[in-house]
Image (tube, grey):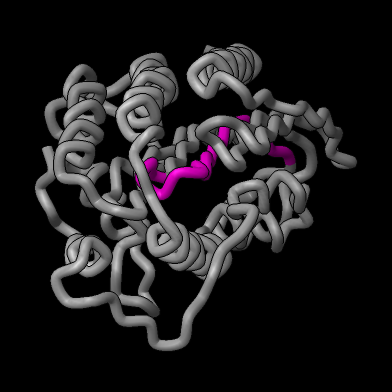
């Protein structure tokens, strides 16, 4: 499977997800911004605003190539003059606080020295953690993982718990999901098998999130829930700007800023030393923002 074929698969996954989300939202549509990278390649950034369910969301596809940035050479200790990278990155921020934020990324990286790898992940950030939704989400991901390898879910779920952790807050960003990186062919997996797994992760996104949209989008909420949503969005912003490797890497290597910061919500909030009421739904959510919870 060559790099252009992989890129085409990712492009089709972007189309599939956008079409499904537009249909499920019922009002919003994606505005497409096609862009070119000065050093080679480009992408399609698609953003939705003010839908029935989605307040702000983005589904990005990119295919970039050219001279390998010094940052990559130094970080991975490699010697390769040229690189190729393609992927799909998604973040959806809903209007209703009872609908969770969701993020997904699938990517492929190839160097001119022959090295390549796949990476990606999908995770859920509920403003209010609902046990039924959390179990549904993780069981769906486990089913995708188990289709390819019995050890994938346990390994990649643990990786997600560690990755989506806000160290300075000592809490997870949400309920995790799966996260993986540097997947390449080895004695157990061919390149084609790795690609099929990544492809299935991408195709699982729409049905999983549409179920959560349909289940929760019409639940009632008030000012208190909106204020809590702003605080949880604030945590999301903190993670993305302080800890997220992809965001930091993109900004440090002169990536396309508008596409990189697409992941941020339209509005967020911070309160000094906020403490939720004991026994409240907000306090219950905070208590569940921990690593190692077995949701599946």
Furthest residue in direction bottom, as rendered: 273
* In this view, 281 is above or below 158: below
Q: What stretch is highlighted in magenta?
A: 82-100
User: Is 110 colored magenta in this rendering?
Assistant: no
Relative to 174, residue 186 above or below: above
**Residue 84 visible at all:** no
Drawn side of residue 67 relative to residue 237, left or right: right
Relative to 89, 251 lies left or right: right
Residue farthest to the right, as pictured:
38
Q: In this view, does 249 lie to the left or right of 156?
A: right
Pick the front one: 272 or 117: 272
Q: Does the magenta stretch include residue 98?
A: yes
Report the residue at 11% width, 37% height from top. 296
In this rendering, the answer to whether 241 lies above or below 106 is: below
Residue 218, given in percent of the width and then of the height, sits at 38, 33
Q: Residue 137's spot in the image, x, y percent?
A: 25, 34
Residue 43: name its quadrant. Answer: top right
Q: Residue at (69%, 26%) from the top-left corner?
A: 30
| Residue ID at (77%, 27%) | 32
Q: Quadrant of residue 276?
A: bottom left
Q: Looking at this view, is 76 or 127 the one in front?
A: 127
- Residue 75 visible at all: yes
Residue 72 location (% of width, % of height):
63, 54
Q: Residue at x 54, y 63 (%)?
A: 237
Residue 174 shown left or right of residue 152 in the figure: right
Q: How many marks?
A: 0
Please, what is the dominant secondary structure of the magenta stretch?
strand
Q: Estimate the x, y position of residue 212 in percent, counting from the top left.
A: 33, 31
**Vertically, is 8 above or below 219?**
above
């Amino acid at each position: 499977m060559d790099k252009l074929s992989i890129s085409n698969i990712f492009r089709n996954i972007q189309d599939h997800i956008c079409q499904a989300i537009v249909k499920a939202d019922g009002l919003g549509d994606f505005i497409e911004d096609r862009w070119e990278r000065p050093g080679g390649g480009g992408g399609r950034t698609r953003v939705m605003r003010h839908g029935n369910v989605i307040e702000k969301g983005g589904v990005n596809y990119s295919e970039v190539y050219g001279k390998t940035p010094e940052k990559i050479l130094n970080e991975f200790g490699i010697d390769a003059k040229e690189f190729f990278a393609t992927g799909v990155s998604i973040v959806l921020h809903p209007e209703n606080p009872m609908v969770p934020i969701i993020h997904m990324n699938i990517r492929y990286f190839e160097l001119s020295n022959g090295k390549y790898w796949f990476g990606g992940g999908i995770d859920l950030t509920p403003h209010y953690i609902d046990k039924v939704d959390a179990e549904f989400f993780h069981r769906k991901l486990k089913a995708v993982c188990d289709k390819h390898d019995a050890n994938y879910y346990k390994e990649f779920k643990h990786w997600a718990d560690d990755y989506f952790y806000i160290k300075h807050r000592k809490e997870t960003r949400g309920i995790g999901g799966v996260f993986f990186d540097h997947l390449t062919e080895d004695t157990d997996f061919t390149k084609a098998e790795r690609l099929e797994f990544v492809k299935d992760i991408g195709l699982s996104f729409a049905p999983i999130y549409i179920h959560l949209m349909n289940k929760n989008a019409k639940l009632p909420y008030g000012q208190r829930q909106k204020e809590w949503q702003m605080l949880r969005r604030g945590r999301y912003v903190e993670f993305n700007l302080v800890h997220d490797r992809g965001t930091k890497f993109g900004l440090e290597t002169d990536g396309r800023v508008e596409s990189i910061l697409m992941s941020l919500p339209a509005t967020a909030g911070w309160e000094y030393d906020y403490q939720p009421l004991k026994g409240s739904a907000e306090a219950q959510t905070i208590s569940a923002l921990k690593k190692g919870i077995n949701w599946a």
